Amino acid sequence: MNTDALVLNTRDARGVVTLTLNRPQAFNALSEGLMEALQRELDRIATDDTVRAAVIAAAGKAFCAGHDLKEMRAAPELGYYERLFALCGRMMMTIQKLPVPVIARVHGIATAAGCQLVAMCDLAVAVREARFAVSGINAGLFCSTPSVALSRNVPRKLAFEMLVTGDFISADEARARGLVNRVVEADRLDAEVEALVASIVAKPGVSIARGKALFYRQLEQGIEAAYEQAVTTMACNMMDAPALEGVQAFIEKRPPRWDGR
């Protein structure tokens, strides 16, 4: 493993991939290079059907401090900014489109696009000391792109308050608002992430992949269309071998015998 890489990639025998943001000296700010590196790693996961889950972690004190403002300020051109934010948006959407659950392992602050990254992950586990903010407004920049992810996690008025004040919220507040799933003491972070991972990889991957795709698709639809999509997805899932085995095992009152995906 190249420890100088902007994103470190490790993988265990179960097919669980951990991607570690590796700009600790810059609080893992999302430079163009870091976003491109993360995009490459996500694209590899998308085409590897042996991956069962992904964890996004970070090196150093912070989880992610958002966009690299020094890099942004060095090129004040509209076209450049449009390309930069499009790059970020594509990377964020890739996380949602992956066929496996993605867990944010948040050990420090997550601000602006860093908070967006947490919101775009399917699940998030944070240490109690972690703090979250969409703080661009403090520099005169409304966090418009982070607001897309934030408003799909946090109730509308609470999300808007965060966006217009730029104030930090605690990990416990983030959990109460729906931004993270679990909050633990620092020495329990890895164990809590592992508990989530173990529960995920014990389930059939094909069922999770179908379910994740439908979950996000139906959220953007009206309820009738959502039910139509869910009916088709569930019927197809029922024809998958793992579901047939799981139902038969339930009928026979025995544990299901699944072979990975």
Image (cartoon, rainbow, N blue to C red):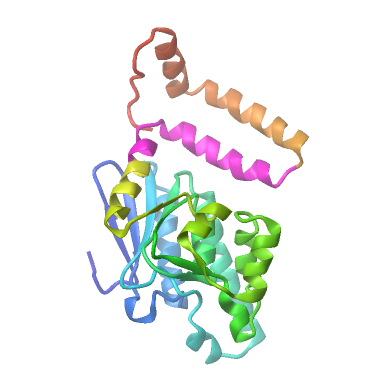
Residue occupying the far top of the picture: 252
Q: Is residue 68 above or below residue 252?
A: below
Tell me residue 202's x, y (percent): 35, 32
Viewer-nearest residue: 125 or 91: 125
Please state the total of marks drawn on the protein image: 0
- Residue at the image position 62 percent from the left and 69 percent from the top: 162
- Residue at the image position 70 percent from the left and 61 percent from the top: 157
Q: Is residue 120 left or right of residue 189?
A: right
Q: Main secondary structure of the magenta part?
A: helix
Which quadrant of the view contains residue 231?
top right
- Residue at the image position 64 percent from the left and 81 percent from the top: 141
- Position of the N terminus, as image quadrant, is bottom left
Residue 213: in magenta span: yes
Tell me residue 50's x, y (percent): 35, 41
Q: Is residue 134 left or right of residue 200?
A: right
Residue 228: in magenta span: no
Q: Is residue 54 left or right of residue 188?
A: right
Q: Is residue 234 above or below residue 63?
A: above
- Position of the C terminus, as image quadrant, is top left
- Residue at the image position 45 percent from the left and 46 percent from the top: 101
Magenta-highlighted residues? 198-221
Tell me residue 204's x, y (percent): 41, 30
